[in-house]
Amino acid sequence: MALKKFFAALIFSLLICVNNCNADEILAVTETPDNWALTLVKTDGGAYLFYIIEEETEKQAFVPYDRKVYDFYLHRDSDGIFSPLIFNLFTMQGPTDVDSEFGTWENRMHILPVYALFEYDGEKVFLESYLSSGEGLHPMHYQGRLQSPFHIKLAETFVTQMPAIHKIIDDKGITLP
């Protein structure tokens, strides 16, 4: 666990330097058997960010914190069905070919909107089908299937590790906005 926190802090620091803000604290880090982690951090400006990190290769991305996204798996509609999860994945290390038509680019930063259908069994979140995206920052349709294994793994880690982040935050007694 200490090694994961070290890598999370190191990678977060590098990304923060790129984005001109400083980390205040790492609030939670999940553990996965395949060396991927989901980390929730609070910046010195009071913003919260989720970082998805692969420890060995230091591949990473971030998702801005949003309460609705954070709690996505806790709410069903009146028919007991989960609404699709839609979030923006920010990465600087992704492929520039296979999924490049999705989302938008700001210099070298790829902002990739992700659409995910999922189920929650009370413990784990499971993806129901492939992850999709669309053109632009707010696509009218999410009909394009993500192809990059890098983007797929980042998005899968974000979605499936959310209950673990919740548990850590709850166990620490941290209140989020």
Image (tube, rainbow, N blue to C red):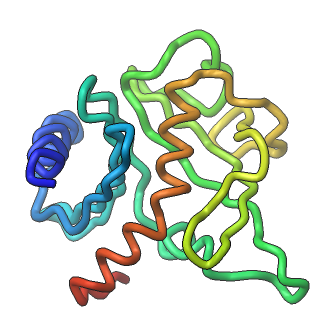
68 to the left or right of 47? right
Q: How many marks?
A: 0
Residue 172 is situated, as x and y percent measured from the top left of the image, at 21, 83
Looking at the picture, tell me which residue is in the foreground, 163 or 69: 163
In depth, the one of 170 and 87 nearer the eye is: 170
List the single residue furthest toward the top: 97
Quarter location, residue 106: top left
The residue depicted at 62 percent of the width and 43 percent of the height is 113
Is 4 left or right of 135, judged from the image as shown? left
Q: Quadrant of the N terminus?
A: bottom left
Residue located at (31% from left, 54% from top): 31
| In this view, 111 is above or below 25 | above
Residue 36, percent across and down? Answer: 36, 41
Of 32 and 82, which appears nearest the observer? 32
**Is residue 3 shown above or below 59?**
below
> Which quarter of the rendering shows the C terminus?
bottom left
Q: Give the percent coordinates (x, y) of residue 63.
A: 43, 51
Q: Position of residue 174 (x, y in %)?
A: 25, 85
Residue at left 67%, top 22%? 147
Answer with the quarter of the image where residue 76 lies.
Answer: bottom right
Residue occupying the far right of the picture:
79
Against 49, residue 88 (above or below) is above
The residue lying toward the viewer, choosing from 47 and 86, is 86
For the point 75% across and 43% down, the residue is: 139
